Amino acid sequence: MSLKIRKIISIFVLTVLVFTPFLKFSSVQAAGIIPLAELGEIETILYGSVSDKPILTRVDEVEETVYNAKQSGSIVERTEKLINDFLISSEKSPSLLFLYNTIEWSIRGELAGGNLIQRLNGLEEMVSGEVNQGPIKERIQQLYNLTIKGQEMPVKKVESRNNQLIRVQLLDKINSNTARRGEKVAYKVMEDVKVQNTLIIPKGSRGKLEITEIEEAGKMGKDGDIKIGFPQLETIDGSDLAVAIQKEAQQENESQKFAIGASVLGTAILGLPGVVAGYFVEGKDEEIPAGSEMYIQVTESKELYGVVIK
């Protein structure tokens, strides 16, 4: 073997040894093995938004909030532990989010607005008169021990009912002259949603509708048009449930005279992947006021965990 060939082989081997760890990490990221979507979901629940910091810093900060200590293992292992503790429920072991939602609902009769840290601070002050310090996991467990421990509220797996109605209220106004396509508008659930005797969506649960199409009012007396759709709604155990306005919700809105602050032009049920049904709304005011109520409906049958209410 010539000296030149040996040098080429040596350079290749050295390159593999030096860069393999980075290549492996990049391929792991590309394959989605690091569950970044779930990490972002936890950040949104805790803080209200997804961090744009490096992944390792994000995991460190969430662990500090939840456990008050950095956990051992790789980024994948640490993130999966956060997901299992915070989001994954079973009948014998509800997640931290599920447990907190149950505590808050049992005390307030509904879920409060804001991120989880804000909600926990408010509930602790309501119960004991002060905000406690320490990791979220311990604070939720302490609040459980102080309030509902000993009360029989068993966890049960149920299947959501397709077309089940949900009454909601807009928390912000929508105006065709100022709103923008893709804008999210908050709403809250006005009544507990149950499957048989199992609570799956508590009163006060927050969701966001999305403005999918908009046309401003014209100078020649043309009305403004607003089309709204409903992305998924979070249930008591943290699962996402598909919702929309379809036939059953439209009929209920008409019977209740829920015109969402304007005249209803029609319902678009397009049947296309990724397209949610919604209302075309038009009127001289070009506005859907805050506080407007309407019905939406569940559009999938999905297994999830709820709290049995006797």
Image: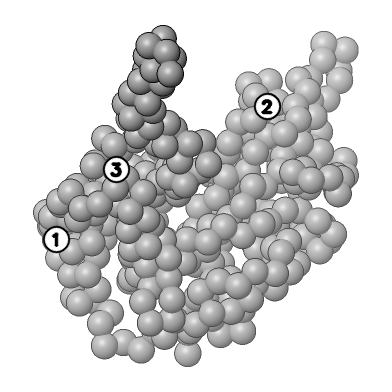
Residue 59 disc label: 3
Q: Of the residues tagged 1 and 3, which is closer to the observer?
A: 3
Q: Is residue 284 visible?
A: no
Relative to 151, 303 lies left or right = right
Residue at the outermost front position: 1
Mark 1: which secondary structure?
A: loop
Depicted 138 relative to depicted 29: above or below: below
Relative to 187, 35 lies left or right = left
**What residue is drawn where x is 68% and y is 20%?**
177
Q: Which residue is mark 1?
A: 129
Residue 105 x, y percent position in the rendering: 39, 69
The answer to which of marks 3 and 2 sits earlier in the sequence is 3
Residue type at mark 2: give it.
Answer: Arg
Q: Nearer the viewer, residue 142 or 260?
A: 142
Q: Is residue 218 visible?
A: yes
Q: Which residue is mark 2?
A: 181
